[in-house]
Amino acid sequence: MTIVNIFIGILMVIAGIFAIEAKKVIDSFILLSIMSLLSVFLFVTMKAPDVAITEAAVGAGLTTAVLVLALKRIGGDEK
Amino acid sequence: MRRFLSALIALGIVLFFINIISILPDYGNAQLSRVSQAFIGKKVTDSPDNVKFKESTNLEDGSANVVTSIVVNYRSFDTLGEVTVLFTSAFGIGLIIHGKKRYKYNQKPNFILRVSVGILLPIIFLFGSYVFIHGHLTPGGGFPGGTIIAAGILLLYLSNEEFDLSKTSKFVESIAGSLYIIIGLTGIAIAGIFLINFLPTGTLGNLFSSGIVPIVYTIIGFKVGAELSGLIADLHREG
């Protein structure tokens, strides 16, 4: 199980770096959502189901929706 | 042909649920694993404990979920602060973004979205309520339950151009916040300590157990759900 956890951790780091370096803002949001989903997997395997269900609802679900709505309000990411 | 196929699919789903019900153990009588025993007994060592699921009564704290007993029973004042932080952020967004009328997407919602809202929305609300009502028995609680309900409200906003609830959400949020403080003050009146668990804790593992913990988690669920729904409503206003 440790190898799988380390692999998921490396994937999370890669998703975080790509979220910073992405050209479009919407791509950053999607990569942040992917990072949250991977951390949900880690929380479940490390036997913290309370944190996992909160992270799945808040981090992967509503935060992405609120960020996309805020991006739509300021008129997209074209310069 | 189409009706025949729909009837076949509906029959398949009904048979699936009937089979599942016969496989599932009775409520609260599942075979517990070693990790679950450690969670319920609130022990980190391997030593045998005398706290038994469905048998122990009148414990100091009767919630089967160890995280809930810390978050809502021993550190309830901390949770009051967390709820206040969430209120402040929602208040800030409402202060910056305010408008007279609802923002419209000016396009007809997708057929799949319109149909699936009718099917999925009651299930989403039911699941959110389940998560915060059973917060003292299973993983979950007021914060994720309220967030799931707010996600259902977001689905309503996306699928219906006329839907608007900014006044309702603020009303529910203020009532729930006041009720939390009133429960704390009742603790002062009865036992002299703010937010103390003044009700009997009952049998470990029952739905009506662990005193004020399920009441407080239901209030937190309503408050968080109304706050995040109000945040989504504020983001949908303009003018």
Image (cartoon, coloured by chain):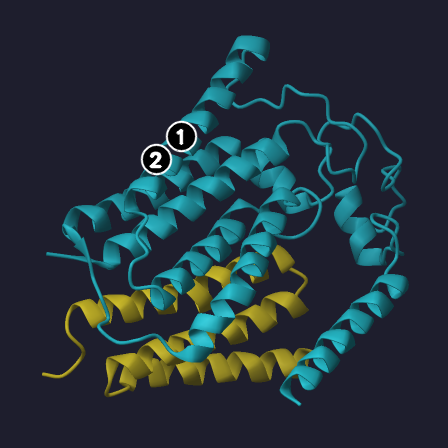
Secondary structure category for the residue under label 1: helix
Q: Residue at x 58, y 46 (%)?
A: B132
Pointers 1 and 2 within a single chain: yes
Indicate the chain on which mark 2 is placed.
Answer: B
Q: Are marks 1 and 2 in contact (CB under 8 Å)?
A: yes
Give above or below for B58 relative to A64: above
Q: Residue at x 74, y 42 (%)?
A: B64
Residue B113 image point, x, y percent: 44, 74
Residue B75 image point, x, y percent: 54, 34
Residue B72 sits in quarter: top right
**Looking at the image, which is closer to me, A27 or A65?**
A65
Callout 2 crowding tier (Cα within 10 Å): few <14, some 14–19, many ≥20:
few
Give above or below for B192 relative to A43: above
Is residue B216 rendered to the left or right of residue A1? left
Residue B100 image point, x, y percent: 14, 50
Residue B172 sits in quarter: top left
Secondary structure category for the residue under label 2: helix
Q: Residue at x 52, y 15 (%)?
A: B186
**Looking at the image, which is closer to me, B129 or B114?**
B114
Give above or below for B211 relative to B33: above
The mark found on residue B171 in the picture is: 2
Q: Colour of chain B?
A: cyan
Is residue B111 rendered to the left or right of residue A45? left
Callout 1 crowding tier (Cα within 10 Å): few <14, some 14–19, many ≥20:
few
Q: Residue at x 80, y 73 (%)?
A: B16
Q: Amino acid at mark 1?
A: Ile
Whether residue B45 is visible, yes or no, is no
Q: Colour of chain A?
A: yellow
Q: Amino acid at mark 2?
A: Phe
Q: Quadrant of the C terminus of chain A?
A: bottom left
Whether residue B157 is visible, yes or no, is yes
The mark found on residue B175 in the picture is: 1
